[in-house]
């Protein structure tokens, strides 16, 4: 009869080996989490850019200011798309989070613009508040992505 | 006597996936577990292996239905994406759960049956008896 395991010897899988395998697994998962940190930054930057765009509309009266804000915004969107495409990892459930947050953001954006251009074209406070409200889904998405 | 068993009445090692007993394959799955998909080069760098070695492991995991790979482009550069299938995610989850169950056990003593194919759990006392008989 063969004693397969005695103190100091541990086949086929002993607690020590299992702990080493778990540590190795956790190390790989931690690296993936670290590489996924771009997602909350992406949402946060979009939220900040949204507020900046609406501040631009509030502080810069006239069509020239609106045109400038739109051009800067377009460049930001282009840059953010390129940034996202370059990432080597797509975090778990990011697609759903992205879709939900940008659908909400888009609806708020369209509503704020339609209302503002029709009723509050020159009211700076309206555009500042609109910026804060429109960016809310992206702030929430950033927090959720960070927690994941 | 404290048998070395998991919560399903069998030793937790029976729930280990033989395919994931390879540290490389376990690390590859761990790397992908928190992601919808990851670039081949990212997994290669994270697990610290060469591209041919990772390709070989990917093929094994693909054949087992645990992983899928897709080729695409980022600009003009080709990029291979790796992602876990549902089966791969389940296998990784249960394998890690089994490892956690084993790691939580006190260091156990196990002997093999006379046929040698199925290790049997023993208490410390029983082990002492067996060792006495063997000597």
Image (cartoon, rainbow, N blue to C red):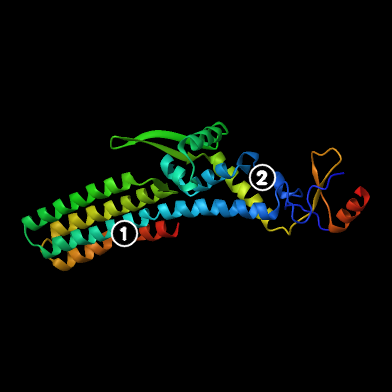
SS label for mark 2: loop
Name the residue carrying label 2.
B16
What distance separates the C-alpha of mark 2 from that of mark 1? 41 Å
Q: Is residue B23 left or right of residue B103?
A: left
The residue lying toward the viewer, choosing from A89 and A129, is A89
- What residue is at 39 percent from the left and 61 percent from the top? A143
- What residue is at 71 percent from the left and 44 percent from the top? B14
Q: Residues within 10 Å of mark 2 (few under 14, many from 20)?
A: many
Q: Which mark, by number, is residue B93?
A: none
Q: Residues within 10 Å of mark 1 (few under 14, many from 20)?
A: some
Q: Please identify the quadrant where the N terminus of chain A is shown.
A: top right
Residue B38 versus residue A76 in the image, above or below: above
Q: Is residue B58 left or right of residue A77?
A: right
Residue B101 visible in rendering: no
Where residue A111 sits in the image (x, y, percent)? 23, 55
Q: Is residue A17 left or right of residue B32?
A: right
SS label for mark 1: helix
Viewer-nearest of discs 2 and 1: 2
Where residue A77 sits in the image (x, y, percent)? 23, 49
Where residue B55 sits in the image (x, y, percent)? 49, 34
- Pinpoint the chain carrying mark 2: B
Q: Is residue B55 left or right of residue A63?
A: right
Residue A73 visible in rendering: yes
The residue lying toward the viewer, choosing from B115 and A86, is B115
Where residue A62 sits in the image (x, y, percent)? 6, 59
Name the residue carrying label 1.
A44
């Amino acid at each position: 009869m063969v004693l397969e395991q005695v103190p100091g010897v541990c086949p086929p899988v002993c607690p020590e080996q299992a702990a080493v395998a778990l540590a190795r697994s956790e190390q790989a998962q931690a690296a993936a989490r670290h590489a996924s940190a771009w997602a909350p930054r992406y949402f946060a930057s979009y939220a900040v850019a949204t507020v900046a765009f609406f501040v631009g509309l509030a502080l810069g009266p006239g069509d020239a200011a609106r045109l400038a804000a739109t051009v800067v915004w377009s460049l930001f969107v282009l840059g953010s798309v390129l940034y996202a495409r370059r990432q080597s990892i797509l975090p778990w459930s990011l697609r759903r989070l992205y879709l939900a947050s940008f659908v909400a953001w888009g609806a708020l954006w369209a509503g704020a613009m339609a209302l503002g251009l029709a009723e509050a074209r020159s009211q700076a406070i309206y555009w500042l508040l609109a910026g804060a409200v429109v960016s809310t889904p992206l702030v929430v998405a950033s927090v959720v992505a960070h927690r994941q | 006597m404290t048998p070395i068993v998991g919560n399903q009445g069998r030793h937790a090692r029976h729930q280990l996936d033989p395919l994931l007993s390879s540290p490389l394959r376990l690390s590859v799955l761990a790397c992908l577990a928190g992601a919808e998909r990851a670039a081949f080069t990212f997994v290669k760098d994270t697990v610290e292996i060469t591209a041919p070695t990772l390709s070989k492991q990917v093929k094994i995991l693909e054949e087992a239905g645990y992983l899928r790979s897709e080729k695409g482009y980022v600009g003009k550069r080709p990029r291979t994406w790796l992602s876990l299938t549902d089966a791969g995610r389940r296998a990784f989850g249960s394998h890690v759960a089994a490892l956690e169950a084993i790691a939580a056990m006190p260091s156990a003593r196990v002997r093999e049956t006379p046929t040698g194919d199925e290790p049997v759990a023993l208490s410390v006392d029983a082990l002492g008896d067996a060792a006495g008989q063997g000597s």
